[in-house]
Amino acid sequence: MAKTIDQYFDDLRETRVWRSIFRSGTGSSTLKRALAIQQNVFLHLFSTKVRTRMLSFSATWYLGTLTLGTFFILIATGIPLMLYYHPSAPQAYADTKDLQFVVSSGMFLRNLHRWSAHCMVFLVFAHMFKVFYRGAYRTPREFNWVIGVILLLMTLLLSYTGYLLPWDQLAYWAITVGSNIASAVPLMGNKIHFLLLGGNAVNANALLRFYVLHCMILPLAAMFFVAIHFWRIRKDGGLYSHSSEPAILRAKALTAETTAEEAQ
Amino acid sequence: MADSKDFTAGVDSNAKKSPRRIVFITRRTSAQVKADTEDQIQTFPEVLFRAAIAIQVLATALVWIALLFNAPLEGLADPSHTPNPAKAPWYFLGLQEMLHYFPPVVAGVLVPGLVVMALIVIPYFKVNIEAEGLFLKDRQRRLRIFYLVATSLSVFLLFFKVYVALIPTLIMAGVMLLAAQSSPQSSSAFRRYLVARPLSYWVMTWFLFELVVLTAIGTFFRGPGWSWVWPWQGS
């Protein structure tokens, strides 16, 4: 009998090399499937089981998952974009022009990166409001909500720092308008403004600072907090659903017991 | 009597492997065991595959958008030539709209600072956890506070001529009044929904409403000198 693709995949997962890398082997038993999550350094951030009800679209609208998706797209398109880009004025603008007209698929890369970035900002906001309206910030998930707020700010900063990089009029004046707000901070506003831009106005220093923040510091920091964000979902008892909370369940079980006793 | 026993006893007899344990399972103390009956599903492969499909659908949509619409690119950055209006990225246009009415230290520092602080402390306030309908308890006192807050906020916005923020505030206040006038036994499902909304719901919904309205106005309705321009007028 001919083998199915699944069986070839199972054979692959039984090979010595695969086992040496991923540690867990094949099998569809609950144990094996739990191990597939638990024995993987990335996947072990997630719990091995999820309440079936939480998979329905209406429970989460998949907003967190989709935000992660945009983050992946942004990494995948951002790295090739970096290969064609010099963070210096006015070379940055020429590089962006080259991406538009010279580099093959450069236009597509830049488009995808930009629209995905806008999409990510939108999804992060949507995710926050959805979590709020479900009341999913309740104990013991308080701190994961706080991490979420940090991630919201990081997403805004990532998008904002990326906004300057094309070094066109749109970028230059958007960052000028935005960074002028920093000057309004009482007492040390001008110092913050200078620190942010590396000068008193948006210039080549600002471009370099925003480039380093955008391509290096902020993505690494975001990954760090995303990892904690996911891990806390597991540690805090999975995705929040009001009727599955221990206190609610306990109350329900007690009520059921009392009713049963009264019936006797 | 032996018949009235309501527990079972068990002894782990392998003393070499584990210390001796005696277990009493009574009817009263096993609530957690009974409660743990909800249907669960393995993360691998079901949940991971669903997540992958969701991401693929999104990626396909974004690829289509990227193929059809080009990212904007204007002329080379020129510090000596200021475009009018100079706009921040769209997610900051709500703030820029506020900057039009208030001094930068209020609109640019105080308001966003307070918003971030408010977001962070949400889960640490008991009022957000209990989630009871705002006007269900202590109705008269809460109505007085509501009138006081809504009126002072409206007068404040009117005084600074922030009509774009005043109108959503008045609409929200109207809906809250409707909630206050509704009863949990109302025949209308919408009114039953409104009356059960807690304070945190109203504050957050007002914030979301203002955020959407101000961002939309900053993006589509502001032209040279931050004057009001209809989207179809062009520039």
Image: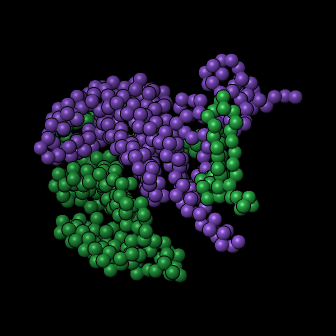
- Is any part of residue A23 visible from this angle? yes
Chain in green (letter): B
Quadrant containing the C terminus of chain B is: bottom left
Of the pair A144 and B85, the residue shown nearer to us: A144
Q: Outermost residue, top direction? A: A16
- Residue B109 placed where, x, y %? 21, 50
Q: Residue at x 48, y 78 (%)?
A: B184
Of the pair B17 and B139, the residue shown nearer to us: B17
- Residue A187 placed where, x, y %? 12, 44
Q: Residue at x 69, y 48 (%)?
A: B9
Q: Outermost residue, left direction? A: A187
- Residue A32 placed where, x, y %? 68, 33
Placement of B169 over or under A92, stated as above or below: below
Placement of B223 over or under A17, stated as above or below: below
Chain in purple (letter): A
Q: Residue at x 62, y 68 (%)?
A: A258
Placement of B219 over or under A209, stated as above or below: below
Of the pair A107 and B204, the residue shown nearer to us: B204
The scheme the figure's colours follow is by chain
Using residue B65 as the reference point, say whether residue A17 is left or right of it.
right
- Is any part of residue B69 visible from this angle? no
Of the pair A160 and A240, the residue shown nearer to us: A240
Residue B202, by quadrant, is bottom left
- Residue A82 placed where, x, y %? 40, 26
Residue A49, by quadrant, is top right
Q: Residue at x 53, y 55 (%)?
A: A245
Residue B212, by quadrant, is bottom left
Using residue B34 as the reference point, say whether residue A69 is left or right of it.
left
Quadrant containing the N terminus of chain B is: bottom right
Q: Outermost residue, front direction? A: B1
